């Protein structure tokens, strides 16, 4: 069902996947709209317990698209450096496919905590207060990963 990367010489070993997902600061989520058009949006995320999590408003295009079709793709790119003299770029990336759904309960709480730890590690106490005030108007989406691959140019 899922295609292998075309450029086998750019395929990275499996252990790079977790590193890239943990180190990345943002990813690009691709969904399918009710009109059949793809919709790709950059967003902050966490990788926790083998899933991708991100927060968003309870309504909007992302939520409509996920309600319409839960199949999504997510891409993260790290370690980018242009190599002008080689007309190329160094990078590491992950492309993954999975199913997205709204997360509730203790899993939502854990994801919110992880988001604060990743993006505001020096403000944990303030972040917890922020979560309390915004939790009811914040949705957490989790992506259950079905397939993932890493590619890159390391030299």
Image: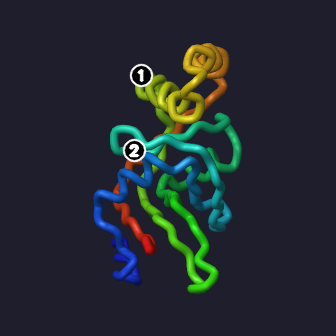
In the rendered image of this protein, does residue 61 appear above or below residue 134?
below
Q: Residue at x 44, y 74 (%)?
A: 155
Q: Nearer the viewer, residue 57 or 89?
A: 89
The CA span between labels 1 and 2 is 15 Å
In the rendered image of this protein, does residue 27 appear above or below residue 154?
above
Which residue appears farthest toward the right when viewing the image?
Answer: 60
* Residue 136 spot, x, y in % from top left: 62, 21
Which residue appears farthest toward the front when viewing the image?
Answer: 85
Location of residue 153 (image quadrant): bottom left
Circles 1, 2 touching at the beta carbon (< 8 Å): no
Using residue 154 as the reference point, say whether residue 146 is left or right of it: left
Q: Nearer the viewer, residue 154 or 39?
A: 154
Residue 31 shows which numbered tag?
none
Q: Residue at x 39, y 39 (%)?
A: 48
Using residue 12 as the reference point, say whether residue 126 is left or right of it: right
Secondary structure at badge 1 equals helix
Residue hosting label 2: 51
Residue hosting label 1: 106
């Amino acid at each position: 069902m899922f295609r292998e990367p075309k450029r086998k010489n750019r395929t990275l070993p499996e252990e790079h996947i977790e590193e890239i997902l943990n180190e990345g600061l943002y990813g690009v989520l691709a969904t399918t709209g009710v009109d059949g058009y793809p919709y790709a949006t950059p967003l902050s995320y966490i990788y926790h317990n083998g899933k991708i999590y991100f927060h968003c408003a309870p309504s909007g295009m992302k939520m409509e698209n996920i309600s319409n079709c839960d199949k999504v793709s997510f891409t993260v790119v790290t370690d980018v450096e242009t190599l002008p003299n080689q007309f190329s770029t160094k990078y590491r990336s992950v492309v993954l496919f999975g199913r997205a759904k709204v997360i509730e309960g203790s899993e939502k709480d854990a994801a919110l905590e992880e988001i604060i730890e990743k993006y505001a590690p020096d403000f944990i106490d303030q972040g917890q207060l922020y979560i309390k005030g915004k939790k009811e108007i914040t949705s957490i989406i989790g992506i259950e990963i079905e397939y993932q691959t890493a590619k890159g140019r390391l030299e």
